Image: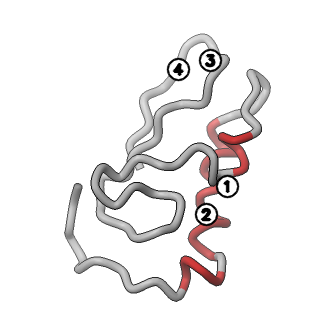
Amino acid sequence: PQIPPPNPPPAVPPRVRFVSRVHMNCVDRRTGEIDYDRVPATRNWNRNTGIGSVLTSLRAEMASDANRRTRQPPEGSTF
């Protein structure tokens, strides 16, 4: 994903957008941006939550039954 670094830690979650095409139920299929309401770390964001929590949540979403079985776009596809 493409994630601009914040300074200081923001009161809102960072903008996260996939550059490589990926089909997940928490990613907009047109833009690659995550749906903040579907990712636990962004849904429950506070200043003490770090980017590591967001990446861990995205990895858990990738491994979920619903997303693991989803047909993915061809290798090398981008948004």
Label drawn at residue 56: 1
Mark 4 vs mark 2, CA separation in Å: 21 Å
Q: CA distance from mark 2 to mark 1?
A: 5 Å
Write down the residue under mark 2: 59
Element at badge 2?
helix
The reply to whether the C-beta atoms of the residues labelled 2 and 1 are less than 8 Å apart is yes
Image quadrant in which you'd find residue 61: bottom right
- Under mark 3, the amino acid is Pro
Q: Earlier in the sequence, mark 4 or mark 2?
A: 4
In this view, the residue in front, 35 or 4, is 35
Does residue 20 sit above or below 13 in this rendering? below
Quote the CA–CA distance across marks 2 and 3. Answer: 22 Å
Amino acid at the residue labelled 2: Arg
Label 4: few (<14), some (14–19) or many (≥20) C-alpha neighbours in 10 Å: few
Q: Quadrant of the C terminus?
A: bottom left
Q: Residues within 10 Å of mark 2 (few under 14, many from 20)?
A: few
- Where does the image place residue 27, in percent across and percent down from the top left? 45, 57
Nearer to us in this view, 65 or 76: 65
Answer with the quarter of the image where residue 47 lies.
Answer: top right
Which of labels 3 and 1 is toward the front?
Answer: 3
**Badge 3 is on which residue?**
10
Would residue 66 be found to the left or right of residue 5 on screen?
A: right
Residue at 44%, 37% in the rendered image:
3
The tag earlier along the polypeptide, 4 or 1, is: 4
Q: Is there a contact, CB below 8 Å, between mark 4 and mark 3?
A: yes
Pick the front one: 38 or 53: 38
Which residue, given by chain and number where applicable, does mark 4 sit on? 6
Q: Are marks 2 and 3 in contact (CB under 8 Å)?
A: no
Give above or below for 4 relative to 21. above
